[in-house]
Image (cartoon, rainbow, N blue to C red):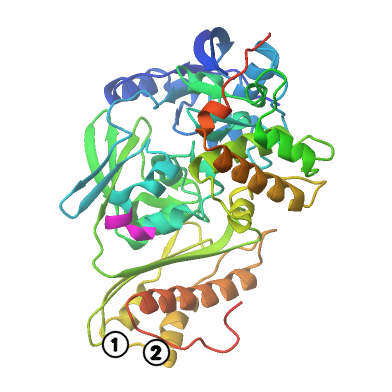
Amino acid sequence: MTRHDVTLTVNGRTRTVSVEARRLLVDLLRQDLGLPGTHTGCDHGVCGACTVLRDGASIRSCTTFAVQVDGSEIRTVEGLADGPTLHPLQEEFWDKQGLQCGYCTPGMLMRSVEILERDPDADPAQVREELAGNLCRCTGYKFITEAVCAAGRRMRADSAPLAEQARPAEVTS
Amino acid sequence: MKPPAFGYAAPSSLTEVTALLAEHDDLEPRVLAGGQSLVPLMNFRLAQPGYLVDLQHVEGLADIRLDGDTLSIGAMVRQSVAEDAPQVAAAAPLLAEALRFVAHRPVRNSGTIGGSLAHADPSAELPAVALAADAEMTLVGPAGVRRVPAAEFFVGPFETALRPGEVLSEVRFVRWPGSHAFVEFMRTHGSFAIAGVACLLDVDAAGTVRRAGIALSGVGPTPVRASATEQSLIGSVPDQDSIRSAVEATVAVLSPAGDVHGSTETRIDIARAYLRRAIEVALGRAGVEVAPHDGTRS
């Protein structure tokens, strides 16, 4: 079957990969680019574990063919930390026990980046509503909501642009 | 989990799209928009097209234009973009309201207006909105362009008036001068809807309903226009009794197929309650208060 060249920028690094048209974005990230932080959950767009950012907007990488993001900028959970310095969202998830098994966490974090970039003042009710498309079977969501709101408060306090705080870390693969 | 192998092209013009669809006719080709319905179906191998023609690079399909009272939305406009667009809020607030019920934001960041309409899920929001608003679809095919009203576009479950080789390129809404309401019942927010109601009412200063456009989702093989309810409301100043009889005029002729998500009886009960609620909300937004009927608000 014909292969197609897909050029995309992942966490600041531009790559070209030759893929079959049926290659899902999540599989391109995990298998072709060696970035297993993005998780495959339900494979049909329901659970949110595979959430990544495409040109700043959160999408399901399991219901997106890699060929559909040719030319796009993708951010994954691997791009959140700056070397050893965690992103405020990651630190707050840690501090507030916003994760237990961790399977949903990459999707939760990437969706939360978009929520706070759209509205850093999002209140708990808003965060619960906006995160409703990401399923967690461990935490009951309370600590996740608290972590996202706390990260929002910190980002406002730091008053640095969020994009700067979440600047891409170098991909090592 | 992955779909079977298929051929793929992402052309830049509708002419190329229709040519590719014709060229690969033997492979049961499909058009790929945002992929939020098609890709899950392909992941499950419930759909196995041998060829996909991706619309993402086709010029002009991602535009939203408001010319006078006509709002034109390109088929590839992402649902979240339409949801945030000031032109949509101004000219088709019913659509803007309904879009917030379509799955979740990350799905709407990929899902498109045209994709949802052409997928024609009878429980989906946008087909009901298009039907209530008398929207018009622009279909482009090898034989040229034709415009099809929503009432003729939805012909069955997941089935539209699109002919083989044709593509939905645009949907047009004419600005509605009155008020609107979109209500929907689902198990949890963002889940697949059981049933919903899209309602447009134009009420004059005396409280008389002048025009109405109402459609239901999830209660038939296609979205269902509540024509009997509209006719019953038009020309009257609605009160509890007249709204009840207007609702019953439509509900009496519904015979939705039951499934694991809701039996026939459940869907009829939901249609009754939500049709009334949609009318009350739209009236309320027009400044007409009708006290809620006992036992109908859940």
Real-space Cα distance between discs 1 and 2? 8 Å
Question: What residue is shown at x 47% (from left), y 89% (from top)?
Answer: B291
Q: In this view, does B196 lie to the left or right of B267?
A: left
Q: Is residue A146 left or right of residue B30?
A: right
Toward which corner of the image does residue B95 lie, by quadrant? bottom left
Looking at the image, residue B290 lies above or below residue B16: below
Q: What stretch is highlighted in magenta?
A: B89-94
Q: Mark 2 points at which residue?
A: B242
Residue A131 image point, x, y percent? 63, 47
Q: Is residue B288 left or right of residue B267?
A: left
Count of labels shown?
Answer: 2
Whether the residues at callouts 1 and 2 have beta carbons within 8 Å, the answer is: yes
Looking at the image, residue B9 lies above or below residue A51: above
Q: Can residue B3 be seen in this view?
A: no
Q: Magenta segment: does it hold B157?
A: no
Question: What residue is shown at x 53% (from left), y 26% (from top)?
Answer: A164
Toward which corner of the image does residue B161 lie, by quadrant? top left
Q: Is residue A33 visible?
A: yes
Question: What residue is shown at x 45% (from left), y 46% (from top)?
Answer: B159
Q: Which amino acid does label 1 sit on?
A: Ser
In what element is the residue under mark 1? loop
Is the residue marked by circle 2 packed among few (<14), some (14-19), or many (20+) residues within 10 Å?
A: some
Q: What residue type is labelled 2?
A: Ser
Is the residue marked by circle 1 packed among few (<14), some (14-19), or many (20+) residues within 10 Å?
A: some
Which label's residue is closer to the chain start, 1 or 2?
1
Q: What numbered label is drawn on residue B98?
A: none
Q: Same chain for marks 1 and 2?
A: yes
Q: What numbered label is drawn on residue B236?
A: 1
Residue A118 image point, x, y percent? 49, 42
Question: What residue is shown at x 49% (from left), y 46% (from top)?
Answer: B158
Q: Mainly helix, strand or loop, the magenta region?
A: helix
